[in-house]
Structure formats: structure tokens, C-alpha cells
Image (spheres, grey):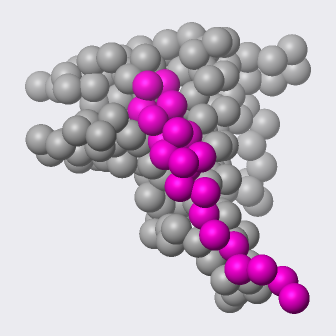
């Protein structure tokens, strides 16, 4: 009998705390900058990661994280994540992927064919991209508010 997936809340919280620190390192002036782009180069291609603030509130900020590769195919959509930063808890979690709200866990199989741990996988993916930008990315140009 297959066991039901139970999210590992410690692991998920640790990932969200690490992502918050990574985002704050990439956008230390989050209160005054609306957007920042990073370029990452490999020997045979380049990619860019765009961090764009969508909403600012006292305790939360919502940032859209999108990537674009120089060899993007017209058949594939660039990945886009909506990340909510909770400043009082110092955490950042992926709340939407491709304009679809994410649940904490999914039954499997399901209509959209999401993995049971899809949300933690997307938070880990975000962490990998942010870490790569910190290590190898170059800021393209900041856009300042008003």
C-alpha cells in the first residue's frame, strides 16, 4: 500500500528561510528598487534572471522571478515563479507557478499531473537559481522607483 505524502515542514521552512536570505542578497534595496536583472553565462549560451516586485506591504513583498535563455524555443514557455517574502518571519516561498496557485501537497495522480511535493521542488529550484546568480550572475541594470 502506497503511503500518503506528508510534507517535511522543517525542510520546507529551512528552504524558505534560505531563499529569503538569497533574495535579500540579490536585492538588498528591495524597498526602493522595482526590478533587477542578472545575466549568467555558460560557455555555449547565456540566461537572464529577472526579479520584479509586484506588491509591497508592511510585512510582505511579492516578487515575480522569471528566466529567459538566449536559445529559448518558441514552443517552450520561460519559467515564471511568484514568490512571497514574509519579512516578519524572514521567509520566501513560491506561491504561484505559471499563474497557477500552488497547494502545499497534491494527491497523485491528479488532473494537472503535479508531483505530490511540487511546492517544495519549486522552492528548491528557486534556491538553485538564486544561488547560481549569487555565485556567477552579473547585474544588468537596476530600475528605481519614482
Of 107 and 68, the residue lying toward us: 107
**Where is 21 relative to 57, above or below?**
above
**Where is 45 relative to 60, above or below?**
above
Specify whether residue 77 is in view: yes
Q: Is residue 108 left or right of residue 1?
A: left
Q: Percent position (x, y) of residue 3?
A: 78, 80
The residue lying at 41 percent from left, 42 percent from top is 92
**Where is 123 relative to 45, above or below?**
below
Residue 11 sits inside the magenta stretch? yes
Magenta extent:
1-22
Q: Quadrant of residue 8?
A: bottom right
Question: How many marks do you count on the picture?
Answer: 0
**Where is 18 relative to 3, above or below?**
above
Q: Is residue 78 left or right of residue 146?
A: right
> Which secondary structure class fits the magenta region best?
helix
Q: Percent position (x, y) of residue 70?
A: 72, 32
The residue lying at 67 percent from left, 33 percent from top is 128
Q: Percent position (x, y) of residue 130?
A: 57, 28
The residue lying at 68 percent from left, 88 percent from top is 111
Of 28 and 64, the residue lying toward us: 28
Q: Quadrant of the C terminus?
A: top left
Amino acid at each position: 500500500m502506497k503511503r500518503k505524502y506528508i510534507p517535511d515542514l522543517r525542510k520546507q521552512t529551512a528552504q524558505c528561510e534560505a531563499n529569503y536570505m538569497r533574495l535579500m542578497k540579490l536585492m538588498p534595496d528591495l524597498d526602493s528598487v522595482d526590478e533587477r536583472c542578472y545575466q549568467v553565462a555558460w560557455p555555449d549560451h547565456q540566461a537572464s534572471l529577472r526579479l520584479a516586485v509586484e506588491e509591497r506591504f508592511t510585512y510582505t513583498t511579492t516578487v515575480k522571478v522569471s528566466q529567459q535563455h538566449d536559445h529559448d524555443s518558441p514552443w517552450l514557455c520561460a519559467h515564471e515563479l511568484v514568490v512571497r517574502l514574509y519579512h516578519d518571519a524572514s521567509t520566501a516561498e513560491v506561491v504561484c507557478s505559471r499563474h497557477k496557485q500552488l497547494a502545499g501537497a497534491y494527491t497523485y495522480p491528479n488532473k494537472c499531473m503535479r508531483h505530490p511535493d511540487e511546492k517544495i521542488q519549486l522552492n528548491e529550484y528557486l534556491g538553485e537559481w538564486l544561488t547560481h546568480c549569487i555565485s556567477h550572475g552579473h547585474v544588468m541594470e537596476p530600475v528605481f522607483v519614482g
